[in-house]
Amino acid sequence: MRFTRILRAWQLYVLLLPSLVYIAVFKYWPMYGVQIAFRNYNPVDGFLGSPWVGLRHFIRFVNSFQFGQILANTLWIAVLGLLIAFPVPIILALLVNQLQSEKFKKFTQTVLYSPAFISTVVVVGIIFVLLSPRAGLVNNAIHLLGGQPIFFMGSPDWFRPVYVISDVWQNAGFSMVVYLAALAGIDPALHDAAKVDGASKFQRIRHIDLPGIMPVITVLFILALGNLLNVGFEKALLMQTSLNLPVSEIIQTYVYHQGLQQAQFSYSAAIGLFNSILNLALLLTFNSVARRANQASLW
């Protein structure tokens, strides 16, 4: 019976086939290499020929003197990014949605959305130029106001604020589009009825727009939590200097240094798998919490 239904709609399955092949080749097949984390991998012996060591690399990472610092650095940036970067697109979408002029509305969306197309390398280059202690625009403004120049990129205290603020500037507009699409699906009759009842714009935002996009907010928040520890590797690595390394060394950059620069393949694979397991645990936990609270969930 099921085979007959498949034959009847074979065109749809043909269209689906390239996506299934992509997922199988690039998502599931690489899982075969996860066993490196449990072996003392040697490229000459291969996956199966390398000796099995079990959880030795995981224990080594947890017991290392760098573990606490690296995990704390990753959590600091991730939590700050979640607390600051997650609400900003929602606020921007609610404000842009209230603009009356369609031309100005489209112009504002374009301006806010455009930074997402800038390469991370270019963004970090702009940061270094703007924050240069000698010729940077920010330090020139500080000097004109009577202050002393600040070496932002060499100060551990400034790494996290600069990272999070630049991340908000680059990605908030892209995330805003999702919420604008959700706002477009709200029935305009609700706003018309609220206007008749004398509701202000703030009251309509609070009682119509926010509840209308709350399922989208909940789902994206769960996904953000499931990706919490996957802090942007490229930007963190490019912003690293020898002076800010105590706060800029995160799990992703540590994996890069250990795996590619020092060729400790099994050790770095174990750290990456440890990070993925933590993300999966966060995703499952908060999805379960959302489902029990009768909110939108992933499943």
Image (cartoon, grey):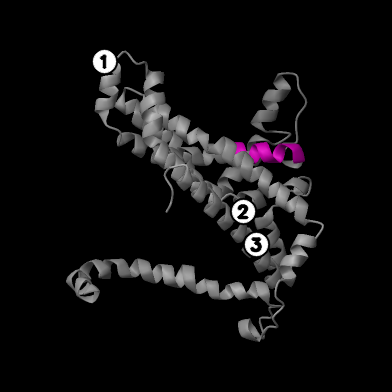
Could you tell me residue 49's position as x and y percent? Answer: 65, 86
Amino acid type, residue under disc 1 in the picture: Val
Could you tell me residue 97's position as x and y percent? Answer: 36, 28
Given residues 204 and 239, the one toward you in this image is 204
Q: Are marks 3 and 2 in contact (CB under 8 Å)?
A: no
Q: Residues within 10 Å of mark 3 (few under 14, many from 20)?
A: some
Give the residue pinned by disc 2: 233
Could you tell me residue 125's position as x and y percent? Answer: 61, 44
Gap between marks 1 and 2, in whole Å?
Answer: 51 Å
Q: Residue placed farthest to the right in the image?
A: 65
Give the residue pinned by disc 1: 196
Gap between marks 1 and 3, in whole Å?
Answer: 56 Å
| Helix, strand or loop under label 3 | helix
User: What residue range appears in magenta?
Assistant: 156-165
Amino acid type, residue under disc 3 in the picture: Phe
Q: Tell me which residue sits at (75%, 66%) in the image.
A: 59
